[in-house]
Amino acid sequence: MAINWFKYSSPASFYSLAGKLIPIFSIVALILFVVGLYISFFVAPTDFQQSEAYRIIFIHVPAAWMSMFLYLIMAGWAAIGLAFNTRLSSMIATAIAPTGAMFTFLALWTGALWGKPMWGAWWVWDARLTSELILFFLYIGFMALQAAIDDPRRADKAGAVLALVGVVNIPIIYFSVKWWNTLHQGATVSLTESPKMASIMLTGMLIMSIACWMYSIAMVLIRTRTIILERERHTVWVSELHKETT
Amino acid sequence: MAWASLSDFLSMGGYGFYVWGSFLVFLICLVGEVVLVLNRRRTLLKQLSLTHKATKNEKNNETTT
Amino acid sequence: MLKVSNLECVRGERSLFKDVNFSLEAGELLQVNGPNGSGKTSLLRMLCGLARPAHGEIRWLGDNIRSLDEDYYNSITYLGHLNGVKDNLNAIENLRISSALAGNGIDESTAYASLQKMGLIGREILPVKVLSQGQRRRVTLARLLVSDTVLWILDEPLVALDTSAVLLVKGILEQHLEKGGMVVMTTHQDINIAAIETKRLQLN
Amino acid sequence: MLKVSNLECVRGERSLFKDVNFSLEAGELLQVNGPNGSGKTSLLRMLCGLARPAHGEIRWLGDNIRSLDEDYYNSITYLGHLNGVKDNLNAIENLRISSALAGNGIDESTAYASLQKMGLIGREILPVKVLSQGQRRRVTLARLLVSDTVLWILDEPLVALDTSAVLLVKGILEQHLEKGGMVVMTTHQDINIAAIETKRLQLN
Amino acid sequence: MFLWVIQRDLLLAMRQRSDVLTTLFFFIIVVSLFPLGVGPEINMLRSMAPGVVWVAALLASMLSLERMFSSDYLDGTLEQMMLSPQPLILLVLGKALAHWMVTGVPLVLISPILGFQFDLQTDALLVLAVSLLLGTPVLSLIGAIGAALTLGLRGGGVLVSLLVLPLYIPVLIFGAGAVEAVSAGLGASAHLSLLGAFLLLSLVLAPWATAAALRISIE
Amino acid sequence: MFLWVIQRDLLLAMRQRSDVLTTLFFFIIVVSLFPLGVGPEINMLRSMAPGVVWVAALLASMLSLERMFSSDYLDGTLEQMMLSPQPLILLVLGKALAHWMVTGVPLVLISPILGFQFDLQTDALLVLAVSLLLGTPVLSLIGAIGAALTLGLRGGGVLVSLLVLPLYIPVLIFGAGAVEAVSAGLGASAHLSLLGAFLLLSLVLAPWATAAALRISIE
Ligand code: HEM
Ligand SMILES: Nc1ncnc2c1ncn2[C@@H]1O[C@H](COP(=O)(O)OP(=O)(O)OP(=O)(O)O)[C@@H](O)[C@H]1O
Ligand SMILES: Nc1ncnc2c1ncn2[C@@H]1O[C@H](COP(=O)(O)OP(=O)(O)OP(=O)(O)O)[C@@H](O)[C@H]1O
Ligand SMILES: [Mg+2]
Ligand SMILES: [Mg+2]
């Protein structure tokens, strides 16, 4: 492998690398979204039990997955930033949080809209739902803490400590599922009506998930670039960058 | 899978409110985030070029005086 | 013993000072001078290890203070702008607790004696919050009388003190220097402290 | 205009001072001197009406200040040991708000101009909490530049200021006295302020 | 000057944009804690809902009380306010209003969503919001008295809750009562007009008491 | 030095004797508010009881968190502590312990009486007290992290609750769960041993995280 990773761990070279990657991810995301939405509405057949309501699954599940993945990735980058004092990784962590919070919100929202027709209630206090809500609070806490701190270096480090402590919490919340009676993912959902339909649904869900992945990466890259500019506005390379563009 | 008519498509077998409520909010959130992120970047770039000009002028003044 | 090289301090986007170099040996006094906002407090906090320099090194007996940590804290006493006294405790309790935190607990009679020296008798069992500004500062400064550290880092110790207290502090510092201690201090007032050598550092 | 008779101050069970008498006319300066804890701050707080005297009377233009209340507050400006600035606001906001509270709102350019006079330019939009000790004091003192009151009551205004700032404050006070204002102040530093008459009150 | 006080407090709140949001999230979190502690049975949750939401509103409003005067006290701003030529009562009213705008209004707006979580009916949701709209200003006004009384005392935060919570209880009873009455099919107008009466009463009396308490605490 | 920190914090708490009492009263009042907000039906109250008591304990513990470091920070004592030759972790542990002794222990002692009010059975009362005994130190330890992170930030009080409450939730679930399990005739030992595991975990990890957070906040 000839890639020099250290080269890209400096904000300046990351900035230009990210600039090249963003269009690629954006376009792939767009195409996958179109394909995914087409499958969701025009290829996937009507569900025998839930009629059309089940189509929410095509966004609900990707959003729920993303919400959890992004938290772990955010905590990972924050930890690297804390341990090795690399500014770039902390910036990436900061950039992930809003997207993660948005997907968490979407999982909650689509879940609630699905719950009303399926369970007859917008919300039930079931373990899966509750832990998703807590995840939302963790994101909000992370962002609120960083917003409350003026000094970016302190904000990075404080956010990292919080994110790490939050990670310890996640498996605990997750295991508490056992102790609760679960309504989520119970008999109400019939994924296996027929093998053919299940596989179509699975492809749709997967395509939508990958689209969300690509979308998240593009968003995070753009946001990281903005944060880099904000924080390094007084360095030489930023002003040289400006000479080039103007 | 084909829909009989547009209104059929919109009603989603009676679940239109829930399905469209989900998908619309999903799209609004994604598009909204894109707009916000790009907006933030644009205002920052504008700010930067302003300060950049200001410092350039300062330097010019210094050299002339 | 203390050696500072190429120190630079950046606050916000401003470089307050750079290329600060000095060294301090036993019995020497360093007076840091400079107008308001020139970075004296920031420098002193770096010397304590409370803040991280943007650039440069601070060495104590040859080792970087970052690597020494608790060993270094055993050798310094820092008094900052803030008094570090608890409003609801009285002077004796405050003195005993702050000494204990600094690593040398003292008993009540020692505390009483040092407060007496600082002219606080009659006020030693009042909660500190009812004391006057100058009296609270004296409670803080009483720590110097019981401290057994080598290097004292004092940020405007004379603020709010009346003339007799200023003389008192002068005496305490001179005695410490005589015994081979070291002092780094800032002040906006004119004061002449006898030392083996008085170094001056002018910021800005 | 200000007339104080037979004032006594009791804190706890101690009488700090009694039988304090003085009067102050336009253009006069009263310097309150005394060692730490002699009751200077307590006296000044009484003059403002923040504390109630144990005994004696304070009259302004012939009326007891207790009965005047808000009319009196229109004529005085008090700066105490505490700065009264908000850590999270910047200098301009702090100045504008404290002036507005004192009854004369000012616009941004006036605020900017007075901060410039106090040597705070370049720092005027930083949150006050990152400023140095002396700079925060300067933000407080900038209020004097925009105040339109007659009687200024200043408790150790010079604390934490560097020499140039001390001169600045001296100038502001002298100008105020010249225009027929009155000043009551305490300080432990030597300072010579030109006034029609400088009265001195020695406590303890 | 009245406007200045409000403006200043709002400015301080906005300076850290997160400030308003945090009160809101505190409210949401506390409301969500109960189902976690009590268990997920929906019938029980539904009948608990008005009480839980109201208790959470009480706590959210109370929690930020301590800061109402204490930061002004510690840095000397309060002294300056007492020396201001404008009447202290106005000033106090301004601060209470600013407190309400930061802590009360967001709660009123979010309460219907929380009601959803507990499966409340539409009319109950409406009454919940209205009762909070009438009740939360009372909380801020009464709270100001407590905050002024405990100024500068150690343990202020806890002490203030001890003083104000008993005074909050009537508001709690009628506020939660209104929602329960609607859920039970009875009208809520009696409860709501009582809340309105509380509001008027506290608008008249509380600033006066707070000003007196401030004078005592400062002396 | 460890002992000195505890001793000092306890001394400070005792200096205003009301301090311990106020946390306690806050706890009692919050627990008593619920029957007022929810209505007097005894069966419902009994099944709510563990949850309500535990939520009240969470809030009481949280309410005093802000003061844990902030007063030391504002008056400069914290700086002195960081410069102390003893390890910061010990110091932090001492402060958390002192916090627990002031806020946690009284709650444990009073909880059986409050349980009585809700008509809990003897074994449930016992488990309630034990679960609080195991759980409240965890609250203090985790809370210390939040308090250290928000040091010196405006809106600290509310912000700290936002950070800390989500982390408290597992303790709440298993604490209240233990009592419910006993009431339902099942054993509580599984819940209690999990609480014990949390305690061990937080004893090891929390002081470390708190010390790191303090260093970050002070710089
Ligand atoms: C607000 C309400 C809801 C929330 C917060 C929520 C949350 C989640 C989460 C976090 C996941 C990911 C779980 C995993 O990967 O193991 C998930 C998956 C899923 N949810 Fe929901 N959900 C909600 C409502 C619903 C409803 C009402 C339904 C259907 C009736 C539903 C059906 C599903 C299905 C089928 C999956 C995929 C499970 C899998 O393949 O692992 N959810 N949801
Ligand atoms: N974020 C920031 N951006 C720009 N300048 C900053 C920032 N933070 C601090 N400063 C500046 O850093 C300096 C800190 O100075 P410091 O407290 O060290 O001064 P000092 O020499 O102790 O002054 P004094 O005599 O008033 O105590 C101040 O001038 C302050 O304005
Ligand atoms: N409850 C009390 N019991 C006894 N003495 C008290 C009590 N409260 C205050 N005092 C004393 O009252 C005096 C208050 O002094 P004040 O603050 O007015 O002094 P000052 O002249 O301003 O001093 P400084 O120069 O230090 O500012 C102090 O000496 C203090 O010890
Ligand atoms: Mg300084
Ligand atoms: Mg004084």
Image (cartoon, coloured by chain):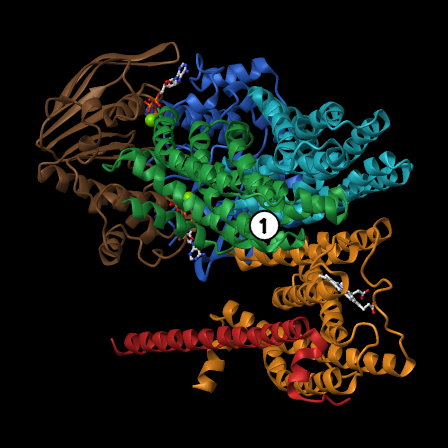
Chain colours: A orange, B red, C blue, D brown, E green, F cyan
The chain identifier of the residue carrying mark 1 reads: E
| Quarter occupied by residue F100 | top right
Total numbered labels placed on residues in the image:
1
Q: Nearest the camera: C24 or D6?
A: D6
Residue E90 position within the rendered picture, expressed as x and y whole percent measured from the top left: 30, 38
Q: Which residue is mark 1?
A: E124
Residue C194 position within the rendered picture, expressed as x and y whole percent measured from the top left: 41, 32
Q: Which quarter shows the C terminus of chain C?
A: bottom left
**What amino acid type is highlighted by mark number 1?**
Ala
- The secondary element bearing badge 1 is classed as helix
Q: Is residue E89 left or right of residue A27?
A: left
Q: Residues within 10 Å of mark 1 (few under 14, many from 20)?
A: many
**Ligand 1 is within 8 Å of the C-beta of the residue at disc 1:** no
Identify which residue is drawn at 20% across, 47% down: D146
Q: Nearest the camera: F136 or F4?
A: F136
Q: Nearest the camera: A136 or A231?
A: A136
A141 vs D46: above or below: below
Identify which residue is drawn at 55% across, 51% down: E24
